[in-house]
Image: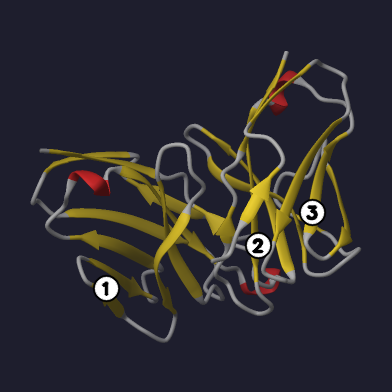
Amino acid sequence: GENVEQHPSTLSVQEGDSAVIKCTYSDSASNYFPWYKQELGKGPQLIIDIRSNVGEKKDQRIAVTLNKTAKHFSLHITETQPEDSAVYFCAASPNQAGTALIFGKGTTLSVSS
Amino acid sequence: DVKVTQSSRYLVKRTGEKVFLECVQDMDHENMFWYRQDPGLGLRLIYFSYDVKMKEKGDIPEGYSVSREKKERFSLILESASTNQTSMYLCASSRGRSYEQYFGPGTRLTVT
């Protein structure tokens, strides 16, 4: 089945710096790759996603890139702010599991001012 | 706004007890999911359901069962709770063929 690896597990940056989180997946049939942000005491919330027919997608300060050949995708956050501090999860949708998602282990991002 | 609610934020149960975790969504979503979240392990899928009375096993179904008698409600059942089921449990829902999942706030279950 699908396996999603996520790195790093923790990331500390200064306010204004960029942050990059990387994920790899194993199932070449996976076709949807979302990123979720989980703030303390809350459930994860979708922040950006990308489908396998697109190489890059951007939404203000966040962007996601996908390399299908290498089976990896990345989250890029520019001009980080303290409110970006949270746990970020990547996920992939194994095609044979309908709309179920397989999540990575998460990255704890800390942005210090 | 989509709202997914879970019956309890915190729950403490004893080993061997039968535990019910309830999840309700108010957006008429077809799909519902149960995950457990543990430090360093991320979110792991326990069970999911695409329709009333239907269920599919996820990656870690052992020790759990589910019930979906109504479209808006998806229950996770621990038949005989054990200490290794101490965890954060997250419920999610999504519409039809959409991949976007909406999560509830989670239930932190402690089994002593």
Please tell me whether residue A94 is drawn above or below residue A4 in the rendered image: below
- Category of crowding for the residue at label 3, using alpha-carbon neighbours closer than 10 angstroms: few (below 14), some (14–19), many (at least 20): many
**What is the quadrant of residue B27 in the picture?**
bottom right
**What is the quadrant of residue A75 in the picture?**
bottom left
Real-space CA distance between mark 3 and mark 1, rounded to the nearest whole angstrom: 33 Å
Q: Which residue is mark 1?
A: A59
Amino acid type, label 2: Ser
Q: Is residue A89 left or right of residue B48?
A: left
* Quadrant in the picture for the C terminus of chain A: top left
Q: Which residue is mark 2?
A: B93
Secondary element at tag 1? strand
Q: Is residue B23 left or right of residue B100?
A: right
Furthest residue in direction bottom, as rendered: A53
Residue at (8, 51) in percent of width and height = A16
Whether marks 3 and 1 lie on the same chain: no
Whether marks 1 and 2 lie on the same chain: no
How far across and down, in percent of the image, does residue A106 sit?
42, 45
Residue at (48, 43) in percent of width and height = A42
Residue at (87, 22) in percent of width and height = B17
Please tell me whether residue A104 is drawn above or below residue B53 in the rendered image: above
- Category of crowding for the residue at label 2, using alpha-carbon neighbours closer than 10 angstroms: few (below 14), some (14–19), many (at least 20): many
Judging from the image, mark 1 belongs to the subunit labelled: A
How far across and down, in percent of the image, does residue B60 sit?
72, 44
Secondary element at tag 2? strand
Amino acid type, label 3: Phe
Q: Are marks 1 and 2 in contact (CB under 8 Å)?
A: no
Q: Which residue is mark 3?
A: B74
Real-space CA distance between mark 2 and mark 3, rounded to the nearest whole angstrom: 9 Å
Real-space CA distance between mark 1 and mark 2, rounded to the nearest whole angstrom: 24 Å
Q: Is residue A36 left or right of residue B7?
A: left
Frontmost residue, B72 versus A110: B72
